[in-house]
Image: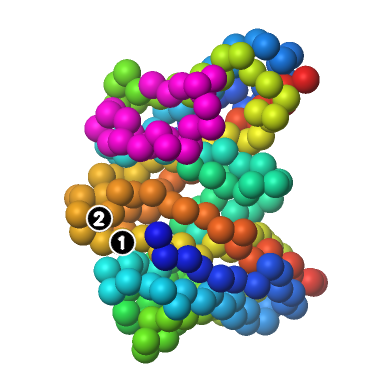
């Protein structure tokens, strides 16, 4: 298995532009998580999905952020418009459903490093 | 969610054992203790988890205090590749388990050759 795949690995954009981050979870996993990591705030959970349905988006910073999971093998995190304070590393992770598996080990992708100028 | 407390940083010499402590005095009886680590420029990776009994796997051992208010992650022979940030995280079992991981600041482990 290739693991969790994220694209792009690096993104540099200008303030006000739309940014779309992509994630392909591990096949068979039905929970998907988006995290953001900055030096100031550490690793923060933004949103997570179970069986393609958003369960908890309380970590999404504001309306400029949106996430979708149209099918079991693809998710996007969109920022529109982007701001310099959105600069961070964004991680996607997937796992088996918490209600089905005991340990629920999460597998993280390599991350997307976003820089907003 | 119950909180964990870890030292900000620790140092170890290569090929020596490392004991990484974690305090979780408000742990619930239904909380699993999970450990993840994050190598430089990578996403976090699972290390080990346990509930009450000590656990061993190929990466590490987890020693859990009898009252479960603290635990220790043990790396038996540290290598340079073990230099990372180690996170101790509590997660509920059963229907309360949403799958969320709440990361603290973790312990930055430096391994000296």
Residue B72 x, y percent position in the rendering: 51, 79
Residue on which the image places disc 2 = B96
Q: Which residue is drawn at 61% across and 30% down?
A: A112
Please say whether residue A31 is visible from this viewpoint. yes
Residue A73 sits above or below residue B13 on the image: above
The answer to whether marks 1 and 2 mark residues whose Cβ atoms lie closer than 8 Å is yes
In the rendered image, the quadrant that contains the N terminus of chain A is top left
Residue appearing at x 79%, y 71% in the figure: B112
Point out the residue furthest to the bottom here.
B66
Task: Give SS at disc 1.
Answer: strand
Tell me if residue A111 comes above or below residue A19 in the rendering: below
Q: Residue A35: horizontal and vertical position, in percent?
A: 51, 39
Query: What secondary structure is marked by label 2?
Result: helix
Q: Magenta segment: does it hold A60?
A: yes
Residue found at the far front of this picture: A62
Horizontal and vertical percent position of residue B68? 38, 81
Chain hosting mark 1:
B
Left or right of residue A99, residue B88 in this image: right
Chain under callout 2: B
Vertical position of residue A57 compared to residue B95: above or below: above
Separation of residues labelled 1 and 2 (CA atoms): 6 Å
The residue at 50%/68% (across/down) is: B4
Q: Name the residue under label 1.
A: B92
Nearest the camera: A17 or A28?
Answer: A17
Answer with the quarter of the image where residue A72 lies.
Answer: top left
Apparent side of residue A86 relative to residue B65 in the rendered image (left or right): right
| Residue A65 forms part of the magenta stretch | yes
Residue stretch in magenta: A46-68
């Amino acid at each position: 298995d290739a693991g969790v795949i994220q694209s792009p690995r690096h993104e540099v954009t200008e303030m006000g532009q739309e940014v779309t981050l992509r994630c392909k979870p591990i096949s068979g996993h039905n929970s998907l998580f988006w995290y953001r990591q900055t030096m100031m705030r550490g690793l923060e959970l933004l949103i997570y999905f179970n069986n393609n349905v958003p369960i908890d988006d309380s970590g999404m910073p504001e309306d400029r952020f949106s996430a979708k999971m149209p099918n079991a093998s693809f998710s996007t995190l969109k920022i529109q418009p982007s701001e310099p304070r959105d600069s961070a590393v964004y991680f996607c992770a997937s796992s088996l459903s918490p209600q089905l598996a005991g340990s629920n080990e999460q597998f993280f992708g390599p991350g997307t490093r976003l820089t907003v100028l | 969610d119950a909180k964990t407390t870890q030292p900000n940083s620790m140092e170890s010499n290569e090929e020596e054992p490392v004991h990484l402590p974690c305090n979780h005095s408000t742990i619930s009886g239904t909380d699993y203790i999970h450990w993840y680590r994050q190598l430089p420029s990578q996403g976090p990776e699972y290390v080990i988890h346990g509930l009450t009994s000590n656990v061993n796997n190929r990466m590490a051992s987890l020693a859990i205090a009898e009252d479960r208010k603290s635990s220790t992650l043990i790396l038996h022979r540290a290598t340079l590749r073990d230099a990372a940030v180690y996170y101790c995280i509590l997660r509920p079992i059963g229907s309360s388990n949403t799958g969320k991981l709440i990361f603290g600041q973790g312990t930055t482990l430096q391994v000296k050759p």
